[in-house]
Image (cartoon, grey):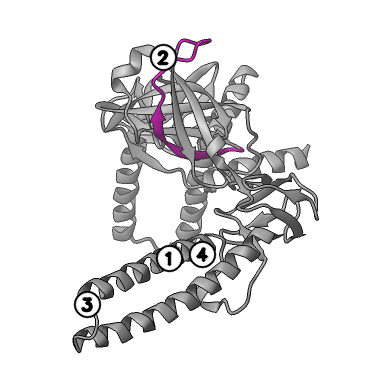
Amino acid sequence: MHKILLISLSFIIGLYAIEIPIEKVQIHEFGKSIELNSKIVQLSSAKQSIMTLLDGQITEYYVKEGETVNKGQKIALIESIELSKMSAEYLSLKNQYLSMNKTYEANKQLYDKGIISLEALNRINIENNEMLAKLETLTSQLETLGIETKNISNTTSKYILRAHNAGRIGTLLKGKHATVSKDTEIATVIKEQAFYLKSYIPLSYANDLKVGQKITITHNNKTFATYIDKILPELDETTQRIVVLSSINEPIDGLFINSYINSTLYINTDKKYLAVKKTALTFLNNEWVVFVPKQEVHEEKAKSSKEHNDEHDKEDKHEDKDGHKDEHNDKDEHNDEHKKEGDSHEEEPQYEARDVKIVNQDDSYVAIEGLNINEEYVSDKTYYVKSLVLKSSMGDGHGH
C-alpha cells in the first residue's frame, strides 16, 4: 500500500516538475489544404537504357545487377570490327590531310611567285577542305564512342559503354561474349529515388492548381514535402479527377512503387484564422481539445502571491522574545502551508480541456474555433497535462 502511494506521489511530483509551455492564441495566415489520395510511381524517364553504339561483341561487364553506379561509370566493354575500320580510316585521313596541307602550302608559294594560277590553287584548297571535313566527321564519331582521337596512334577495336546518370543496375539483358547489333539494349540503370507522387485532385479545384504548389506526405512518422512538377492535360478515366505529378527529391526508406499514401495539397489563398500550434491538439472524449489554464487558478495565484508578500512584510517588522520558538513555529506553519498547497495540487489540476473545431491547417499550425485571441493555451507536452486531467477525473469518479 505504501509502495503504491509512493509511486502515485512520485508520478504527480514528476508531472509538476515538467515545465509546461504556455503560448497565446494568435492570428495566422493559411493556404487552403486538401486531403488527397496519392500513388507512388516511377516515370519511364527514370529508367536509362544502355545501348550499343556499333555492331560487336560484349567482352566484359564492369557491373552486376543491383549494383549502384555513378554518372560516367563503366558498364561494359564492347569489341567491334567496325570500330577497327573506323580508327584505321581516321589514321589514313589524318595522314592524307597533313600531306595535302603541306601540298597546299607549297603551291601557295608557287602562286605567290606567279608560277601557278589562282584556279589551280583553289582546286587544291577545295580538296584540302573536303579531306578536313571527312576527318572532322570521323573524329566526332570516335569521340561519341569515348575514343580520344588525339591519343590514337594505332587502330583500336574496343570501346566502353558508360552510365549517363547515377542509379542502380536493373537488368543485364545480354550475356558476356554475346554478339550484339548497333542500338541493342544490353542493360538498364534505374535512377536512385526517382519517385513521383501521382495525386488525384477534385475537378472543383482546377482553377486553383499551379505548378510549384506543395503536397506533403507522412511516412514512418515523418513529413516530407513534394512540389507539383506537372499538371496532366487529361482527367483520370476512373476517378474523373485531375492528375498532378510532384517529384520526391529526398531519400525515403521503405517507399514502394504503386503503393497508395495519404497526402495534403496546400493552395495559396492566404486566409487568416485564429490558430494554435499543432502540438497543442489532443483527442479527449472523442473530441479535439486544447488545454488552457483555469481562470480561477490564475486569480488564486495572483492573490496568493500578494498575500504571501504582505505576510513577509509583517514578519520582518514583528519582534518576539521567544524568537527561536516562534521561528520554529513559523517554519512548521510554512511547511503546513506548502503541504496544503501540495494537497490542493493533488486534488485538482491547473488546466482544463476546451473543445475546439479544426477549420484549416498547415505544417505547424491549426486554425481553430473555440478559443479567443490572446487566450493562453498549452502549446506542447499535452500528454502530461492530459494524464493529470484524466487522473483527476478518475479520482472524482471514486468520490475523492
Q: In the image, what residue type sits under mark 1?
A: Glu
Left or right: where 294 falls relative to 93: left
Query: Reading the chain from its start, which is encountered first: label 1 or label 3?
Result: 3
Q: Distance between the residues labelled 3 and 2?
A: 81 Å
Which of the two marks, 4 or 1, is nearer to us in this view? 1
Of 119 and 225, which appears nearest the observer? Answer: 119
Is 92 located above or below residue 326 in the figure? Answer: below
Query: Reading the chain from its start, which is encountered first: label 4 or label 1?
Result: 1
Magenta span covers which residues? 220-240
Q: Can residue 204 be seen in this view?
A: yes
Q: Quadrant of residue 108?
A: bottom left
Residue at figure coordinates x 75%, y 38% from the top left:
4
What residue would you read off at disc 1? 136
Query: Is residue 362 highlighted in magenta?
Result: no
What residue would you read off at disc 4? 143
Q: Distance between the residues labelled 2 and 1?
A: 57 Å
Query: Reading the chain from its start, which is encountered first: label 2 or label 1?
Result: 1
What residue would you read off at disc 3? 117
Left or right: where 330 falls relative to 178: left
Residue at figure coordinates x 35%, y 12% from the top left:
204
Which of the two marks, 2 or 4, is nearer to us in this view? 4
